[in-house]
Image (cartoon, grey):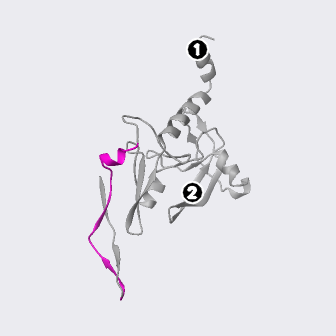
Amino acid sequence: MSVSRYPIEESSSMSKRVKMGIPLVLGFSNEDKLGTIQPHDDALVVTLVMIDQGSGAKIMYPNLYKGLNLKPENLTAYGSHLVSFEGKMVIPKGQIRLPVQTGSDVVEVDFIVVDIFSPYTTIMGRPWLHTLEAVSSTLHQKVKYPSGGQVLEILGSQSTAMQFLVVAIQHRPGAEILAIAENGL
């Protein structure tokens, strides 16, 4: 469990004053697991966005890129290659900086744009979590972050995570052959 200290503002009729030393707790308890299916090993998926604590990259996939009507001229060069979940080398189309709104907070995010299949629209990694000063938990299927003197939550969707896992597995090369062999067709 992480604890961060942020000033909490109290209103008074004369003026606002800051009360120091009251910690906002950015952590999880067993109550936070209510509404999730336990035990599980699901990724944290929030409205088609995967929160990947292990990734330093913020990845944008073709559906979102096209949905935002972005064009190749909107991209800046990105010189490094990436490695996909399947272990294949991926050459990014480029990079773009876009504002991402989380509640009332807006954070500028540098997305690496790739042109490969993914059921997700984007993957948000550690830099986004750190900028928001957020704490995520796949076990609790939540992200918590401080905003305006309170702790806000973003809820994950286990059913979407499970559906996307199936889609990703089915999309792998050779998955059709494997499914046919398993079904005895």
Quadrant in which residue 175 is drawn? top right
Q: Secondary structure at mark 2?
A: strand
The residues colored magenta run: 14-35
Could you classify mark 2 by the number of other residues whose Cα lies within 10 Å: few (under 14), some (14-19), or many (20 or more)? some
Q: Is residue 185 above or below residue 175?
A: above
Residue 183, numbered label: 1
Q: Secondary structure at mark 1?
A: helix
Q: Return the residue found at the far top.
A: 184
Residue 58 horizontal/vertical position (percent): 54, 50
Name the residue tied to disc 2. 110
Residue 183 in which image quadrant: top right
Above or below 39: residue 136: below
Residue 173 in view of the camera: yes
Which mark's residue is nearer the viewer, 2 or 1? 1
Q: Residue at x 49, y 43 (%)?
A: 157
Look at 62% across and 18% down and name the residue there. Answer: 177
Q: What type is the residue that disc 1 sits on? A: Asn
Q: How many marks?
A: 2
As drawn, the residue found furthest toward the bottom would be: 14
Q: Residue at 58%, 18% (x, y): give it.
A: 178
Q: Give x and y (percent) for residue 92.
A: 63, 46
Q: Which is nearer the N-term, disc 2 or disc 1?
A: 2
- The answer for how far apart the CA atoms under marks 2 and 1 are is 44 Å
